[in-house]
Amino acid sequence: MSGRALIPSQLFTARTLPGISRQSPHFNRCVAPPLRQKYVRRTHTHTHTHTQSMPQPKFSAGTVPADAETALAPLLTSGGGRWSLTADGEGLERTFKFTGFAKAWVYFDFMTAVSIQCKIKKHHPEWSNVFNTTYIRWTTHNPKGLSTQDIEMAIACDAIARDLGEIAQQPDQGPSCELAGLANTVVGSAGDCCTPKK
Ligand SMILES: C[C@H](O)[C@H](O)[C@H]1CNC2=NC(N)=NC(=O)C2=N1
């Protein structure tokens, strides 16, 4: 053991927390996304203006939009799937949850199986895990945007989770903001993995 004492106030100040940087592309993911559509609802006493955003996919250069749209549609909650587009449209995100006593360690099997696919496909996720819940975001860093590889990895994740007995979540349970925030922290400190070295 090193003799150097850890001083908690130094460890946990905002300044020393790694990666929560406004430069991170995903910094704002769990706060209100850009306003795109306005809905006005009238009641008998007031006029309320409600805003709601509907992210559209932003594909990476080289991705054929028509093919990607076809593969993407059934993955999204709007198409009966369990993935959501990230607010900027450049990624797909969802949480996976394995519950119940019998599933005690299955989330590690899940992450292990996904890791093997990442290695085979040479494509890495932005992900985080706490206990039985794993958050995954698929986005391509270079060229930036949503790519066929992201969609294929999302399909692979669904298949692995199904094989491992994933419990269906309530349809209204979106990706966990806490776990997305945890992944964002790592994204902010990970450095650039994906720009080809000259
Ligand atoms: C050289 C290597 O293939 C590239 O760095 C790959 C690796 N995995 C990757 N994964 C993701 N998610 N985005 C990328 O742009 C990417 N690039």
Image (cartoon, rainbow, N blue to C red):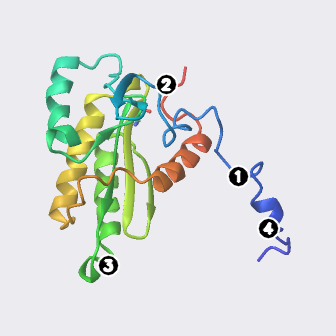
Residue 111's image quarter?
A: bottom left
User: Residues under labels 2 and 1: Cα distance?
Assistant: 28 Å
Q: Residue furthest bottom?
A: 101
Q: Tell me the kind of residue under disc 2.
A: Pro
Q: Secondary structure at mark 2?
A: loop
Q: Which mark is residue 196?
A: 2
Callout 2: CB less than 8 Å from ligand 1: yes
Q: Is residue 164 visible?
A: yes
Mark linked to residue 104: 3
At which x and y percent is residue 85?
33, 35
Q: Secondary structure at mark 4?
A: helix
Q: Which mark is residue 17?
A: 1
Q: Which mark is residue 144?
A: none
Q: Position of residue 143 (x, y in %)?
A: 41, 22
Which is nearer the N-term, disc 3 or disc 1? 1
Q: Is residue 43 above or below residue 158?
A: above
Q: CA distance from mark 1 to mark 4?
A: 12 Å
Q: Residue at x 17, y 33 (%)?
A: 73
Crowd tier of the residue under label 4, counting other residues whose Cα lies within 10 Å: few below 14, some 14–19, many 20 or above? few
Residue 87 falls in image quadrant: top left
- Mark earlier in primary sequence (2, 4): 4
